[in-house]
Amino acid sequence: MLSVTVLLLFTTGCWSSNEIEDLSVYVGLGLDVAKESKFEQNINQQGASYPKRKVLTATVQIVPPIAGKNEKQSGSAPSSPSKAYLNEQLTGDSLIQIFRQFSLRRDRPLIGHHLKVIVISSELARKYSLEQVLDFILRDNDIRPSCLIVVSHRSALEALSSTEPGEIPAFYLTGLVDNRYRSNKILPPMSLIKLDSTMQSGKSFLLQNVVTAQSEHKFSGAAIFNGNTKKWIGELSQYEVEGISWIKEDVVGGALKTYTAGDGHSITYEPKNSHSSIIPKVHGDDISFHIKIHSEGRFIEDWSFPEIPTTEQYMRELEQQFEEEARKQIGQALDKMQHVYHVDVGGFGEKLRIKHPGVWRKVKDHWDETFSHVPITYEVHMKITDFGSSID
């Protein structure tokens, strides 16, 4: 009986646990340049304010604990009973203080254990370093380091809003990343922990860009961040992101489209197996790079209506056209990196560090500027392995 009584002590539940119905679980966090909501403006007029500067506005996207229960959504976009989420905002100059202020207006404390995505507006990232903006997030052990980081072309609140019944924008954005096998315009996901290590390395980097129109969202291009300042300095287009994906061997799907020389009809190649290598070359103080790209895939669409589309000669002509299009994408991406923004976001410095560590130690402190003047050559080889289920 004594043994049974002792065993019962080890089968009890957690005495320090909190029921999920008693918590406000937020799955999305948006960070914008300070813009007080009407709710904040009204309560400030009533004296309900505290000492702060207007630096940033934080939006938390909360999943209501009980489906169908109506809760008020203050200080954010208009809500409706059909929405599966709540967006609430507060403004200040300390993110943790803003989070604690939510305790004054919600009967359930915020919990960030299930945070899926952090959206940072490009306007805020242009003004402040990501190290400043995310300092509390990186220190807080309540937030999982696996959450996704993206940049909103306009406000983060817009990227976390939707008029689609039942849709939770935070889940929608994280779900888009899973489509990488369908498109090489989607960057490899940048998690919070990966972003932290990237910033610590001092390298310039890319974050997925989100654009919003009429409450609908789309991944489009990439935001460029300077490795020294950790600030937003510009953007790459979708076309240029495709070029980056060829360089960094991130092509896991997608479509490469070009046009026939004679009639201008579109023809499309679907990459299935691609490989690239960046080869650093050092001669004295001179540094250069050569990129080798090889891809195998499917000839998947042809609007030119050729008479004999499956002949060996026709396939070779198509391969040359697709190679030329890939070279254009790579060339445009390199031009943006070297001559417009003067940053290396293609992984060239890492290859130099591995192959020639002595040379890297000499140039690493001013690598972005050095990279801007480094000669880069590239070769692309495409091989069409099949042409779908066509029987022509």
Image (cartoon, helix red, strand yellow):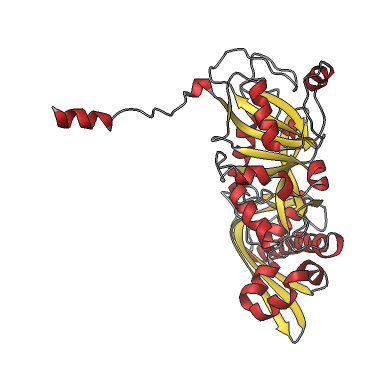
Kindly give the residue lying farthest to the left in the view shown.
1
Splitting the image into 4 quarters, where does residue 111 fall?
Answer: top right
What x and y, as percent, mark residue 386? 57, 57
Residue 191 appearing in the image:
no
Query: Is residue 345 shown left or right of residue 173?
Result: right
What x and y, as percent, mark residue 332? 81, 60
| Relative depth, front residue between 267 and 201 | 201
Splitting the image into 4 quarters, where does residue 50 fall?
Answer: top right
| Relative depth, front residue between 46 and 59 | 46
Q: How many marks?
A: 0
What x and y, as percent, mark residue 35? 82, 30
Query: Is residue 149 shown left or right of residue 18?
Result: right
Residue 175 appearing in the image:
yes
Splitting the image into 4 quarters, where does residue 5 fall?
Answer: top left
The N terminus lies in quadrant: top left
What x and y, as percent, mark residue 119? 70, 39
Q: Is residue 349 above or below residue 243?
A: below
| Relative depth, front residue between 266 and 210 | 210
Q: Is residue 288 above or below residue 368?
A: below
Kindly give the residue lying farthest to the right in the view shown.
340
Kindly give the residue lying farthest to the bottom in the view shown.
284
Q: Is residue 199 above or below residue 91?
A: below
Residue at 69% of width from left, 33% of height from top?
97
Query: Is residue 340 shown left or right of residue 109?
Result: right
Query: Is residue 116 shown left or right of residue 374?
Result: left
Residue at 78% of width from left, 63% of height from top?
334
